[in-house]
Amino acid sequence: MRDVAIVSYAQTPYVASETKRNEVEMLMPVLSEAVDKSGIPRREIGFTCSGSTDYLAGQSFSFVAAVDAIGAWPPICESHVEMDGAWAFYEAWIKIQCGEADSALVFSFGRASMGDLPSVLTLQLDPYVLQPLHPDAISLAALQARALLDAGLGSEREWAEVAARCRRDAKDNPDALVKGDVDVEALLAEPNVVSPLREHTLPPVTDGAAAMVIAAGDVARKVCEKPVWVRGLDHRVDPHSPGLRDLTLAPSAKLAGEKAGAASKPLDLAELHTPFAPQEGILRRALALGDDVRINPSGGPLAANPMMVAGLARLGEAARQLWTGKGERALAHATQGPCLQQNLVCILEVA
Amino acid sequence: MSEEQKTVKAIDGPTRLEYRYSPGRASTRFLRGMEQKKILGQKCVGCGRVYVPPRGACARCGLPTEEEVEVQDTGTIVTFTIVRVPSQNIEIELPYCAASILLDGADIPFTALLRDVPVETVRLGMRVQGVWKPDAELGPSFDNIDHFTALDEPDVPFEKFQEHL
């Protein structure tokens, strides 16, 4: 295996609705910042990979338009995944492992506010028997939350405490959207949106973009004072149909965590892609994270959940924590699909 | 085979999603210009190419196109195709010409409808001009130019536009 490290990361401030700039206009400053910070000249970056979905903009091939932001001339080696940017990161890592590139630019973007996101996400479900029932993303998460309550694996108070902690931690993150000190009792007094989920357990609809440069060992050591090394990376998938799963568990997250070597040494922090507050408990158990591991010090997806970006942002936020001396070993997690169906785990170290 | 055992080969899955699309800074400037019959391109801060319509970035350089440049509604056909096959939702009488037109002052062509010209006479380098909708029908839309038609001017030699295909 080749050593690969994150050498730079940039993201937009996350907003509820980006109406002034289109995707390309949103991306250009972020790409420039990530490339400039990397110390690798743009033309020398060996591979570029993006993650996004056309369903957010409601325009087919809108991801191709985003290539305008890269400056792909002379022609570059480029790819796209219809997935969160964390999977673009995975493809770039593979490309470097295969020796086809020594560095890569990874980016993702989305303006989820232009459509009705919970309904848009319905289209990721099986089109034959589930999609026609049109269960939106919040309703499916509510089924999962109900299953947790019934199994005694969570409580509404626990979820409110998770939300309060995330908003408190987000005060230190200039890019976060939902932040501040909130009273748990006040959160518990909110009405249900979809029982048993209240507003504070839901991810804020968020627009934004993020970009990252990763590089193989020698290049990373040359350009970066403190490379954040990828020590383990794996992603796994549970059955597509939520009806085939025990929604209180995330076996694919557990397996990805094991394959990535999460437990081989103590972790200082974990950035978990938990769009819904009840999912934090599921992932804590699946990834065997003890109480000494700080969860989502950036504020996490409850503070900003840019669709298709939030997973890549977990990697970026974890790297930022390590760059600023908040720890030496971090776990970054990304998810896609309904109810934590697909999970990616990455172990990052600065030592 | 009984009725029940027949293989299902297709199902209907009606889906409707509504979007509130916002076009961004560059396209907004362009569309506001169209309302006033002005064609506003944008110039790349790096290579100087003028994009019409602008999307805010130079696809070659990956840099913002910040300087606004008004271009003419006259231009040159840099490539074209004659459409002879009917398509769903297109109600233009066949055959018709879809032309790639480089406006005077722009560096990037776009595709538009050419009308009132016998299709067998269409050629590369042909000079054309936009035909605008009546003022009362103008809105923030590229459709304000209803179509293009031929200008009575000498053809532009290929060498003059070969960099702009």
Image (cartoon, rainbow, N blue to C red):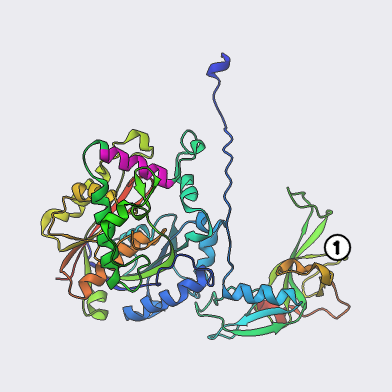
Q: Can residue A4 be seen in this view?
A: yes
Q: In which quarter of the image is the N terminus of chain A?
A: bottom left
Q: Is residue A189 left or right of residue A109?
A: left
Q: Is residue A273 visible?
A: no
The vertical placement of A56 against A318, above or below, is above
Q: In this view, does A67 lie to the left or right of A91?
A: right
Residue B131 figure quarter: bottom right
A140 within the magenta span? yes
Residue type at mark 1: give it. Glu
Q: Where is residue A37 in the image (x, y as percent from the top left)?
A: 33, 80
Q: Is residue A98 left or right of residue B135?
A: left
Q: Which of B28 and B9 is in front in this view?
A: B28
Q: Count every numbered label the image shows and give the total.
A: 1
The span picked out in magenta is A137-149
Q: Where is residue B113 in the image (x, y as percent from the top left)?
A: 78, 64
A107 within the magenta span? no
Q: Is residue A240 left or right of residue A322?
A: right
Q: Position of residue A201 (x, y in %)?
A: 33, 52
Please tell me whether the stretch drawn in magenta is mainly helix, strand or loop.
helix
Read off the residue under disc 1: B120
**Which residue appears at 18% of the width and 49% of the height?**
A258
Residue B56 figure quarter: bottom right
